[in-house]
Image (cartoon, helix red, strand yellow):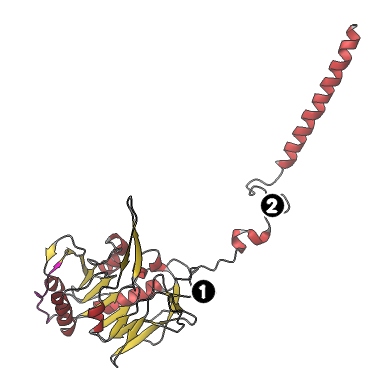
Amino acid sequence: MSDRSLVQPIAVLIVALTVVLAGTFAVSALVGSAPTGSPDGANIEGQSPAQYHPETAGIDADPEDGELSVEPTQDDSRIVIDIRRSSETTRADLEPVTESLFEAGHSVTVLDGEDDEAFGDALSGSAGLLIVQPASAYPDGERDAIQGYIDAGGHAIIAGEPTQTQVGGGLFASVSQVSFGATELAQGYGVTVGSEMLYNVNDGSNDNNFKSIYATPTRGGVLTEGVDKVTFDRSGYVATSGDDVTVHYTAVEGTKTIDTRRSDTHPVVVRNDSVVFVADGSFLSQPELYDADNEVFTSNLLSFLARGDSGNFGGGAGTGQGTDEETT
């Protein structure tokens, strides 16, 4: 075979390789010509239709911002927060609440079950009592102490929910029912917390979850000032009896009870003079604390507590676990 017969195929192979490499380089340069910083695939038609861009997805979420603002005090007033009977709420969950009270000049006593002290003694000299998500009943002695405390001028707020189903962890999962634990206490003030949760599936009537209902004020006053609407994640409803109970918030139209499907503008926040009942407890913890106007509503509640005056209450009635006092 002559040298010429060998050179010709090699030359053809070199030309072919040159063409392939040149084409690859050209395609790479073309693909890389999109502006720096553009999202992957943005220059490919059909890859990212405009209706699927995040900014046009149409999710109308409530803003989660704002801050708590509690009415300041001229005196060294103290607020008692009782979470001894709560199965979920912890001291850490309520840090924004306690910090806002401190900043306004109030001191705070948190009852969480760590120590032993007379419940009545913890109430003595305090302005207000906040009970959060009670899941077990108050004994007679403590109910008597609360009654005496309110009669002496103290203010109280009871924030709790209807019966919940909880699933325990561990090797074998357990299911239990957690009920509202202040039933007898509430009934003494003409209030009953319903056993069913509320829900609303109508667009614009929930906070992106059918169980996160909206509620709106029904009257003016310290509890509703500056509030357009609030949202509750695990709300029940309140049934009232007697002329002393006034309704301050109701669920928006289209809200129903989850078992019986009873539609109504159900009362969710009511007041009997010095006692306020809220048919939800989750709004006091983040992130629900800053949904809609929840932070304004919570500020109103805390200011209401700070206006109490139990100076004539001697304490000493009833025993309870868990007193830990923090002061500014």
Seen in the image, is 249 located left or right of residue 133?
right
- Which kind of residue does numbered mark 1 sit on? Val
What secondary structure predominates along the stretch shown in magenta?
loop
Q: Which residue is drawn at 12% across and 80% down?
A: 313
- The 10 Å Cα crowd at callout 1, few under 14, some 14 to 19, many 20 or more, is some
**Helix, strand, or loop for circle 2?**
loop
Q: In the rendered structure, does residue 315 fall within the stretch colored magenta? A: yes
- Residue 35 on image: x %, y %: 68, 47
Q: Which residue is drawn at 29% across and 92% down?
A: 242
Over which residues does the magenta segment extend? 312-320
Can residue 55 be seen here? The reply is yes
> Does residue 57 lie above or below 169 as drawn?
below
Q: Classify residue 180 by image quadrant.
A: bottom left
- Residue 134 on image: x %, y %: 26, 70
In this figure, which residue is indicated by the disc labeled 1? Answer: 201
Tally the marks: 2
